[in-house]
Image (spheres, rainbow, N blue to C red):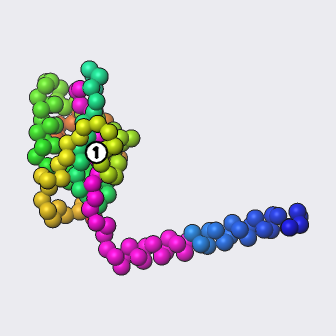
Amino acid sequence: MIEERYPEYDDARISTAIEASDHLDSVMSRLTELVGPPAPQAFTLTFAGRERHIGKAPTSFVVNACDINDAVFVLSRLPSWREWYLADAAESDNGADIIYLPEQSHPGLPTRGEFNDLRAEQRPAEPAHTSALATLPRSASPVPAPANPAARTLH
């Protein structure tokens, strides 16, 4: 290739890549519409309670959900989560001292360590909902749920 043609060649490659990316996005959107919502899968949500102050590992919960936001919603409604939350809150007059650890929360099962598998506790036809994952409490909250209820939006 002639060196003075490199800028034109690069511009053509960039244009082609952008067009292909746009086309792929539209194909993926259409396929998602045709196929429907994704099937539920296991999600791990990890929280650190008071145990973090004495060097213990955080607590992980596994639930079935369609995405991480749905997993937060599902977890907030399970009795085992509420019991764990209330047990932490009962240890102090200041309420629960629980923080969400997004860097340790992910699709799938944990690869190491112990976890609380709450999938059997879920109802078989748990409806999918969307919640605002970014609003999870970073400090004590009087509500025994992993997300701020006021910030939750149902679609």
110 or 76: which is nearer to us? 110
Q: Quadrant of the N terminus?
A: bottom right
Please identify the quarter of the rendering in which residue 86 is found: top left
Q: Is residue 131 left or right of residue 143?
A: right
Residue at point 14% right, 62% down?
124
44 or 74: which is nearer to us? 44
Please name the residue that numbered disc 1 is placed on: 45
Q: Residue furthest top?
A: 54
State yes or no: residue 50 in magenta. yes
User: Mark 1: few, some, or many residues within 10 Å (few <14, many ≥20)?
Assistant: many
Residue at point 29% right, 36% down?
113
Where residue 21 appears, as percent x and y from the top left, is 57, 69
Amino acid type, callout 1: Leu
Q: Residue furthest front?
A: 112
Q: Give the SS element for disc 1.
A: strand
Question: How many marks can you see?
Answer: 1
Residue 85 in sight here: yes
Q: Quadrant of the C terminus?
A: bottom left
Where residue 42 appears, as percent x and y from the top left, is 27, 54
Q: Is residue 29 above or below residue 3?
A: below
State yes or no: residue 62 in magenta. no
144 or 51: which is nearer to us? 51
In this picture, which residue range is highlighted in magenta? 22-51
Residue at point 12% right, 52% down?
121
Residue at point 64% right, 68% down?
17
Where residue 103 appears, as percent x and y from the top left, is 39, 41
Residue 135 in sight here: no
Where residue 92 appears, as percent x and y from the top left, is 15, 24
Please identify the quarter of the rendering in which residue 22 is found: bottom right
